[in-house]
Image (tube, coloured by chain):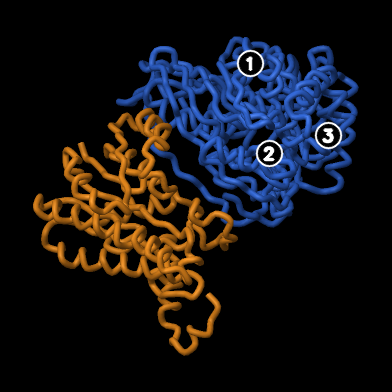
Amino acid sequence: MKRLLILGATSDIARACAHRFAADGFSLVLAARKPDELDRDVKDLQIRYDIEVKTVPFDVLDMEQHRAFFQSLNPLPDGVLCAIGTMNGNEDAMSDPQKLKVILDTNLTGPAAILTLAAEAFRKRGSGFIIGISSVAGNRGRGTNYPYGSAKAGFTAFLSGLRNRLNKSGVQVITVLPGFVRTRMTENMDLPEKLTAEPDKVAADIFKGWKKGKSVIYTKGIWRLIMLIIQHIPEFIFKRMKL
Amino acid sequence: MSYQTKISGWGRFPVTETRENRIRKTDDIRTALAADGSILARGLGRSYGDASLAPEVLSMLPSNRMLAFNEKTGLLRCESGVSLDEILRTFVPRGWFLPVTPGTRFVTIGGAIASDVHGKNHHVAGSFCDHISSLKIMTADGKIKSCSPRKNTALFRASCGGNGLTGVIVEAGIRLIPVESAWIRQTTVKAANLDELTAQFEMHKTATYSVAWIDCLAGGDAMGRGILFAGEHAAKEEVKEKFPLVLKPGPMIPVPVSLPAFTLNPLTVRLFNNSYFNLAARKPGPSLVNYRSFFYPLDKVANWNRIYGSRGFVQYQFVLPESAGITGLRNILGEIVAAGTGSFLAVLKQFGKGNGNFLSFPMAGWTLALDFPEKPSVFQLLDRLDSQVSEMGGRIYLTKDSRMSAETFRTGYREKVNAFMKIKGETDPGNRFASLQSKRLEITP
């Protein structure tokens, strides 16, 4: 039976992905800081898909425990999906280095650390896949969002480098770049409807991309074009814009 | 989590600005209750009028977890945001079916309970809530209360069909029924007028499912002509499929934009009705159809509500008690035919006995569901129909309504309104749960 490890399993995108992969017959290991919050989801996934689901406690900021956590996974999963991320305290982080560190660690250092362990294990086995959910916010730093954006930029670069390094080792690395998604993270933000995806749509795009062996997935697809334009705005104009 | 958006019922009339809160766990409801103002739980928004509209709504769609299933009894316990479609996709392949289903599978369990929806088997199986074993409701005080036909009966009776006005349904137990296949043995019978059609219902009254399409433009001798569809769950031997319980995913036909309002006019509806009536005649008798075609023909067309154009449409469904007889039905039908406004979808059904739920719609007698484009002459016609229905002791379905008067409501639901108001006053004295409809019907201030 195929097995998927989901890191940050309480997030809305993770939950949608759990359903999508479970429908394909994957059994699931759901890792979250507070795994008991997932009790109802576990029952739901078991009833709907008749699969094995278990939860494990995992704190992305507690990096010293990452190795022990990963080694405790038995058997080694076929794939890992990392949906960890936060925008909490984004604004405070612009003036408070401690808060900036939490954002960078949660979105970049922690996920990169745990995926490094996964990548090594998969490389040795010669198979596996790693799906990292980054963000279009990482494609160019913006004045309103750069703590989160810079962390995601780092994470995108990490995934890109990992993919390059593991290219011949049988390990597939996928970078997911969502635009606006209607989740807890974007709560109370008034998002433009046409550019905003539901978590189910993001999960469907990820699954399709994984099946097709894609490397980089924009979701919604229109964001590829939007970011292409944004990235090509000359800096002397960009720095004056309110974004 | 909340955001500003515009919502409407399935009829796309009226439209209202709302603050939508997504409910993932029961604490999210408490957060919404902690603020001021009236709120209302909402599911997939398939009620037609304003029953699910409020300035602040709680979307129960993220609360869609299945919590327990008993393989022996078919009892499913789940959160209220689970849709009938999800239940069918999960359980039909295992040999279970919904005990009662409305004409769309894109409704939530919570919505189906709040509307106490009915289906083609009402005459033998009752309505949706007759198959609900228990409910959990969060009331205005933030407490979760269990109720069932035996426990906290009054709260149960008020909440089943209560349009979310007693609180937020968070969990329900529903008894699924065993089936051997995903197929229905359908019998189609053509009837040349109302007498023939009602006689056909009489002949098929032991059928598990029965419903008729009726041509609302045909007058004179042909008034009330229609086609009766009767159905039974097919046994596995009847189905020549390797996996009789499994259906291939069907195609979804989109209606990407609102069609111009003139698309449906008396002429095009007449053309449609004629060809539909005559096509059905070509292959009368029994045939095997899958459950999606039998129960949910319109679900194949995503956003079929756009065919009425951007102004939307009004649904109108009334029931006349048995005492009104076929004469009562004929009088009302005569009024509709004379108006010539043209109802694209007109559905006739004979209800069995109603249940004790305070605001449930069904009662023994004839029910007719119609839809009309949103325009002034239609509202005048419906006002006339209201008074006829009231006079004969009938009533209007709240789930489809967007325009009846508070008086029509009170006359139709009679003493049951008082029973409902008593519970409403006890559980929600501050009227925290209210809808545009409840205000219009003076259920809430």
Q: Residue at x 32, y 29 (%)?
A: A50
Q: Nearer the viewer, residue B14 or A103?
A: A103
Mark found first going from the N terminus, 2 or 1:
2
Mark 2 and mark 1, same subunit? yes
Residue that badge 3 annotates:
B441
Disc on res. B40: 2
Residue B349 at what x, y percent from top left?
68, 22
Mark found first going from the N terminus, 3 or 1:
1
Crowding near pointer 1: few (<14 within 10 Å), some, many (20+)?
many
Relative to B62, say whether A49 is above or below: above
Q: Colour of chain B?
A: blue
Dot 2 falls on a residue whose secondary structure is strand
Q: Residue at x 89, y 41 (%)?
A: B380
Residue B143 at what x, y percent from top left?
62, 28
Residue that badge 1 annotates:
B126
Q: Colour of chain A?
A: orange
Q: CA distance from mark 2 to mark 3?
A: 16 Å
